[in-house]
Image (cartoon, rainbow, N blue to C red):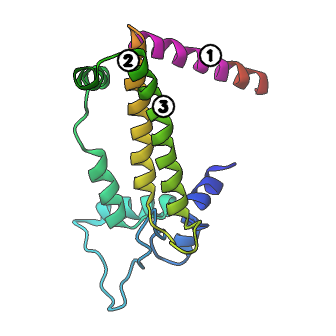
Amino acid sequence: MSIPDILATLSGGDLPADAVREERCLKPPIGCGKPLISEDGTVRVFWNEDEAGQYEAEWRITGLCPDCQDRIEADAEEPAVDLWPAIHGFAAWLDESNGRSEHEKTLRILKVSEEMGEVAKAVIGMTGQNPRKGVTHSLEDVADELCDVAITALTALASVVDNPEETFAANLGRIQQRVSELEARRG
């Protein structure tokens, strides 16, 4: 499946090329779907031609209007958190609340499945798969749920092995090696 096919699936069939041709933003849930020039003829005012050119170039690639581009940039500017100290903190908090028996570790592992179900619900809601409910979620909702899966899985990992960082790094390296080998065979 190509990137345009993936975008089309996530956006209910809308592609950046469609948005550019129709002089609008991508339709929800990814963009706002609004025309670049509003019905009353107003357009966004930029500081200078360079800024306007940058927004236009990005719009031609992504299909996202300047406001949606700004929203995505603002979301990306949130402060970074150190992953493993945070994960160890989550595991310690759970240990303090629930202990770390075999039963508790099993429940932490099962929690990953529960979170994955929330991803599925968000994807179904984003695509409007249920005609009775329509579109109820956005791509941002799907991304948030995927993050919940990753955090829950890493917390479960930190609960069942002594060195989750090393275990994760070793598995990441193993998968990276497998992908490199597959690419070498193709090339």
Query: What is the quadrant of the C terminus in the image?
Result: top right
Task: Pinpoint residue 80: horizontal percent, then vertical percent.
Answer: 25, 34
Task: Pinpoint residue 12: horizontal percent, then vertical percent.
Answer: 58, 66
CB within 8 Å, label 1 to label 2: no
Of 17 and 81, nearer the camera is 81
The answer to if 178 sits in the magenta stretch is yes
Please name the amino acid that badge 1 sits on. Answer: Gln
Q: Residue at x 59, y 14 (%)?
A: 174
CB within 8 Å, label 3 to label 2: no
- Marks 1/2: CA–CA distance: 24 Å
- Marks 3/1: CA–CA distance: 29 Å
In the image as oriented, which residue stretches furthest toward the top?
162
Residue 91 quadrant: top left
The residue wearing badge 1 is 177
| Disc ID at residue 110 | 3
Q: Which residues are magenta?
A: 165-180
